[in-house]
């Protein structure tokens, strides 16, 4: 897993839905890391007049575009969940655009290291050659389900269905170079992030 030599140290941050990736990423930003969030890039691409909207309209039809010109995310989410071919088509449109923008932000960064947040890093494989280390935010599946239900209002069955569509916790941990345990209260995150921050600074300083 070797990023281009001209790039800073690049850490791929991943974890299952509801694991706490955003909270961890925010803490790394506080410590001075450059955070590149691929979900945020995807949202900008599919916002009103976003760069991906025209291609989505052409391939899926206008019914998937909301009145304000943005992607109707609820309708698309339901569609691709039951249609793997539709999901692959959507990914073929979005993923190259997301990777290009992520690469641009990494190359432009002046921070000591970059944290790239990729929810499906292990599943997609498209970032394995873009990161130097993989950091997994981990917690129990039951905790993930409870957090998803609380923040989104989804039913337990819906949350479990989303979780089942992602790679297993075992596979994610097997791929990890570093792990942050987010099973407990949020106060336990900061010392773990600070420890890794020091580790990444030391790695970046090596010739």
Image (cartoon, grey):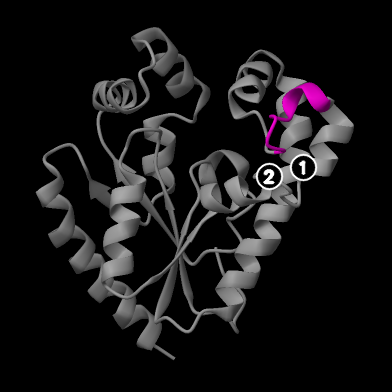
Q: Nearer the viewer, residue 66 or 96?
A: 66
* Local secondary structure at mark 1: helix
The chief SS type of the magenta part is loop
Residue 106 pos. (x, y %): 56, 72
Question: Spatial distance from mark 2 to mark 1, Cα to Cα?
Answer: 8 Å
Q: Quadrant of residue 185?
A: top left
The verdict on residue 64 being magenta is: yes
**From the image, which quarter does the N terminus lie in?**
bottom right
Residue named by callout 1: 53
Viewer-proximal residue among 177 and 79: 79
- Labels 2 and 1 touching (C-beta < 8 A): yes
Residue 94 x/y as whole percent: 71, 45
> Helix, strand, or loop for circle 2?
loop
Q: Residues within 10 Å of mark 1 (few under 14, many from 20)?
A: many
Mark 2, residue position: 48
**Residue 45 is inside the magenta segment:** no
Mark 2 or 1, closer to the camera: 2
Closer to the N terminus: mark 2 or mark 1? 2
Q: Which mark is residue 74?
A: none
Instruction: Please identify the quadrant where the C terminus is shown.
Output: bottom left
Give the image location of residue 128, x and y in percent: 58, 56
When the figure is inspected, residue 191 is found, relative to residue 70, above or below; the finding is: below
Using the image as rendered, state which of residue 164 and residue 185 is in the foreground. 185
Which segment is the magenta one? 62-69
Image side of residue 182 versus residue 73, left or right: left
């Amino acid at each position: 897993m070797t990023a281009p030599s001209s790039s800073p140290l690049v850490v791929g941050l991943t974890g299952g839905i509801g694991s706490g990736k955003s909270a961890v990423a925010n803490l790394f930003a506080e410590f001075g890391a450059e955070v590149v969030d691929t979900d945020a890039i995807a949202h900008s691409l599919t916002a009103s007049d976003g760069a991906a909207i025209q291609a989505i309209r052409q391939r899926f039809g206008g019914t998937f575009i909301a009145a304000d010109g943005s992607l109707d995310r609820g309708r698309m989410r339901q569609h691709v969940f039951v249609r793997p071919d539709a999901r692959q088509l959507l990914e073929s449109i979005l993923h190259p655009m997301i990777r290009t923008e992520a690469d641009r932000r990494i190359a432009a960064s002046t921070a000591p290291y970059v944290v790239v947040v990729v929810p499906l890093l292990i599943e997609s494989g498209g970032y394995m050659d873009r990161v130097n280390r993989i950091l997994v935010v981990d917690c129990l599946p039951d905790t993930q389900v409870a957090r998803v239900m609380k923040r989104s209002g989804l039913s337990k069955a819906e949350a479990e269905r989303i979780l089942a569509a992602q790679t297993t916790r075992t596979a994610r941990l097997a791929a990890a170079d570093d792990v942050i345990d987010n099973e407990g209260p949020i106060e336990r995150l900061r010392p773990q992030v600070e420890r890794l921050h020091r580790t990444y600074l030391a790695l970046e300083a090596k010739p």
